[in-house]
Amino acid sequence: MRATLSVSDDTWAYSMTTEGDVVWVAINRGDADLPVSGLPAGTFTEALSGQSVTGPQVTVPARSTLVLTR
């Protein structure tokens, strides 16, 4: 199930939930790095880079997406 967590003109954050698994996705379609909020508080691992980020707000690079797991 997908649930929108936050949305603005250039950003969107949502969670995808299946049986026992949750993934959070933060999208920035803008031309500048932008903060995206609405995520749960805590530490996440960005699935593609392995980088750690901390919520409930993350900075998403311009025209990019973060796929976050715990």
Image (cartoon, rainbow, N blue to C red):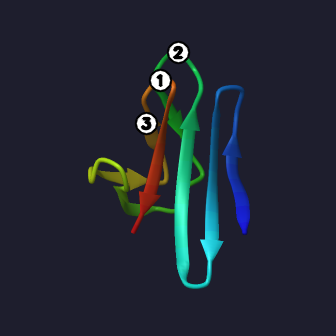
Q: Left or right: where does residue 69 sit relative to residue 8?
A: left
Q: Write the residue at 49% across / 53% down.
A: 56
Amino acid type of the residue that numbered disc 3 sits on in the rendered structure: Thr
Q: Are marks 3 and 1 in contact (CB under 8 Å)?
A: no
Residue 29 horizontal/vertical position (percent): 59, 26
First of labels 3, 2 by sequence position: 2
Mark 3: secondary structure: strand
Mark 1: secondary structure: loop
Amino acid type of the residue that numbered disc 2 sits on in the rendered structure: Asp
Q: Nearer the viewer, mark 3 or mark 2?
A: 2
Q: Write the residue at 55% across / 84% down.
A: 20
Determine crowd level at label 1: few under 14, some 14-19, many 20+ residues with C-alpha closer than 10 A. Answer: some
Location of the C terminus (image quadrant)? bottom left
Mark number for residue 59? 3
**Residue placed farthest to the front in the image?**
48
Vertical comparison of 18 with 69: above or below: below
Vertical comparison of 36 with 9: above or below: below
Mark number for residue 62? 1
Vertical comparison of 43 with 31: above or below: below
Mark number for residue 31? 2
Res 39 → quadrant: bottom right
Res 12 → quadrant: top right
First of labels 2, 1 by sequence position: 2
Q: Are marks 2 and 1 in contact (CB under 8 Å)?
A: yes
Determine crowd level at label 2: few under 14, some 14-19, many 20+ residues with C-alpha closer than 10 A. Answer: few
